[in-house]
Image (tube, rainbow, N blue to C red):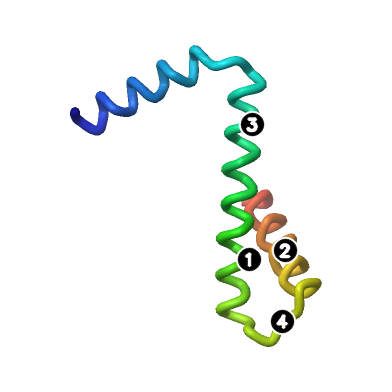
Amino acid sequence: MTPSGALDQQIQRYRRMTGEQRLAIALELHALSCDLARESIRRQHPEADVGEVERWLRRRLELARAT
């Protein structure tokens, strides 16, 4: 299967899903990306406590929205 064929099939699957199913996937992907960002922040700032990591994460999200 080609990459474009796989993409077409994935789009067809998404179209067959309910809005709730698509929303659930989007929320899971958001949670996963936040977890990955937290890990990155912890590597960059190993001294940061949980609250600091969350502040760094919120700042990253704010910057992403601004662009």
Instruction: Work out whether mark 3 precedes mark 4 in sequence or the reverse, and give the earlier one.
Output: 3
Q: Which mark is residue 38?
A: 1
Q: CA distance from mark 4 to mark 2?
A: 14 Å
Under tag 4, what secondary structure? loop
Foreground: 28 or 61? 28
Q: CA distance from mark 3 to mark 4?
A: 31 Å
Query: What residue is shown with label 3?
Result: 24
Rendered location of residue 32, percent (x, y) = 58, 51
Mark 4 neighbour density, 10 Å: few (under 14) some (14–19) many (20 or more)? some
Q: Residue at x 58, y 80 (%)?
A: 44
Q: Residue at x 41, y 21 (%)?
A: 11
Amino acid on which the number 1 mark rests in the picture: Arg
- Tally the marks: 4
Mark 1 neighbour density, 10 Å: few (under 14) some (14–19) many (20 or more)? some
Query: What residue is shown with label 2?
Result: 59
Amino acid on which the number 4 mark rests in the picture: Ala
* 2 or 3: mark nearer the eye: 3
Under tag 3, what secondary structure? helix
Q: CA distance from mark 2 to mark 1?
A: 12 Å
Instruction: Work out whether mark 4 precedes mark 1 in sequence or the reverse, and give the earlier one.
Output: 1
Q: CA distance from mark 4 to mark 1?
A: 11 Å
Q: CA distance from mark 3 to mark 1?
A: 21 Å
22 shown above or below 57? above
Rendered location of residue 7, percent (x, y) = 33, 27
Mark 3 neighbour density, 10 Å: few (under 14) some (14–19) many (20 or more)? few
